[in-house]
Image: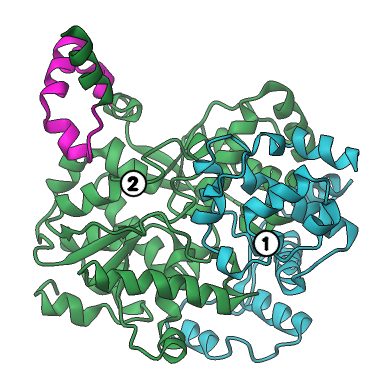
Chain colours: A cyan, B green
Amino acid sequence: MNKFRNRIMEAGVDFPACYQCGKCTAGCPVAFAMDYGPRQIVRFLQLGMWEEAFSSHSIWLCTACDTCSTRCPRGVNPAQMMDWLRVEAGRQGIVAEPKVKIFNDTFLKLVEKYGRVPEVELVIRYNLRSGQVFKDARLGPAMLRRGKLHLIPRRIRGIGSLRQVFKRVKQ
Amino acid sequence: MMLILSSLVLNYRPSSIAELENTAYKRIFDFITDGAVWQHEGQQKGLEKQMKFAYFPGCSLNTTGLEYGWSTRAVATALDITLQEIPDWNCCGASSAHWTDDWLSLVLPARNLALAEQMGLDVVAPCAGCFSRLRAAESVIRQPDRRAELQEALGMPLNGEIKTCSLLDLLANRVGIPAIQNKVVKPLTGLRLVCYYGCLLVRPPGITGFDDPENPQSMDQLMKALGAAVLDWPCKTECCGGNLATPRTDLTLQISGNLLKTVYAAGAEAVVTACPLCMINLDARQKEMTKRFGRLFQVPVFYFTELIGLSMGFAPETLGLNRHFTDTLPLLSGQALI
């Protein structure tokens, strides 16, 4: 567990510095929906309870709004902590909120495919993969009527080199 | 005596930029420094350089944020700002890259910065999300060892000489409020607004580098200059629910719904924003909110550029004001603005 400790601290999360004031949770827009508030997640790390942190819903519900890190009087950087825990949990296959991961993965796959985000394909693919075929079905036509969606996605010209970039990053 | 005086000076915190500018402190400082410290870095630059920028519209401004793109173009034309679109730009990776892979979230925007460097122009990004990702990449490019890694991953040269600014920063600080006020032909008198900055435009302050992260003022000052009444509001920099809108719509409805409830409580009629994702979350889901919360949600939401364009005399259709989900036109015609 010590390896996690060093790696998250290298990423800029100074969790030992936290004195549990709770300012992060007080300002968090999603705290009401989390199983553990940001302060409690920091406490998990201090107590070496990494499994609890990785398996929490909180790390997937954080919107990365950065209110906590901006206000933290100890420079702990809880937003960066959530990012790090989410990425690491994803690598380990511990995903408490599968829909969030499905959405992000679908989004990035499409960026790799086209270079930009084709909104229609994103929503259709996300709906199919998450098993909610008719989700936001009313919003689609309303957007189309307003000229806000393009049905046929276009690739950027440099898509070949962009895919190389994706490949290099994955290595 | 000196102690009391110096503690007064040091503890002085202006509650707004307007107040700051009108105080004796400014005059004293101006006298000592010749006004240099009060000038925005960009303002000095702008005087010498022609206003020409590499334009990064991002994915939203051609699609779901159509009005933002149109009104940006209109306002830029009126102010003689040349926006040259970065050729073959790619998606900045948005929240999804940020949530999935730290390195990918920097490499994707860095490609756009490399393209802009080839143009030799500073970048302007209207979308708060794109702006935030571009600035994050920029901060890494400034670190020589990490820049080398980025270049390798990209396969493109990066010299870190250009800067990215948000459209709000550009208009409020570089172009400046007086220049915009000069173009106003139809003041927004009678319109009661609250300004919504959201997260990514002001946080983290080390990355965004402009305006106050808790009580920003640039949009407030702009809207006041157009003649609108700008009201105090506790939710200026609250999150709208962001990327959760698709995977956890229930949470976004609750977060954005709570925001909109406070708009009425503040005594305002409409919200002004500078982010296409905030716009969707606030504007497009008001019918769902009405159903869910059992009370009517009908709050027009504007891009700040739409209101600037309107006050400059552009037609509502040119700015996309007729494309919103929550109708903006009754409010505007009620105030005789269209």
The magenta span reads B12-39
Q: Which mark is residue B68?
A: none
Q: Which residue is disc 2 drawn over?
A: B215
Q: Chain of mark 1?
A: A
Q: Which residue is disc 1 drawn over?
A: A36
- Identify which residue is drawn at 20% across, 18% down: B35
Residue B2, position in %: x, y?
19, 7
Q: Are marks 2 and 1 on the same chain?
A: no
Q: Nearer the viewer, residue B302 or A86?
A: A86
Badge 1 crowding class, 10 Å Cα cut-off, few under 14, some 14 to 19, many 20 or more, is some
B109 relative to B260, above or below: above
Label 1: state its secondary structure.
Answer: loop
Label 2: state its secondary structure.
Answer: loop
Residue B112, position in %: x, y?
60, 44
Disc 2/disc 1 C-alpha distance (Å): 28 Å
Left or right: residue B254 compared with residue B151? left
| Residue B25 seen in the current view | yes
Q: Amino acid at mark 1?
A: Tyr
In front of the other: label 2 or label 1? 1
Left or right: residue B118 compared with residue B20? right
Q: Is residue B86 magenta?
A: no
Q: Is residue B21 magenta?
A: yes
A126 relative to B175, above or below: below
Badge 2 crowding class, 10 Å Cα cut-off, few under 14, some 14 to 19, many 20 or more, is some
Quadrant for residue A93, please give it. bottom right
Query: Looking at the rendering, in which quadrant would you find the C terminus of chain B?
Result: bottom left
Residue B298, position in %: x, y?
31, 82
Q: Are marks 2 and 1 in contact (CB under 8 Å)?
A: no
The total of numbered circles placed on residues is 2
Q: Nearer the viewer, residue A40 or B187?
A: A40
Q: Chain of mark 2?
A: B
B164 relative to B198, above or below: above
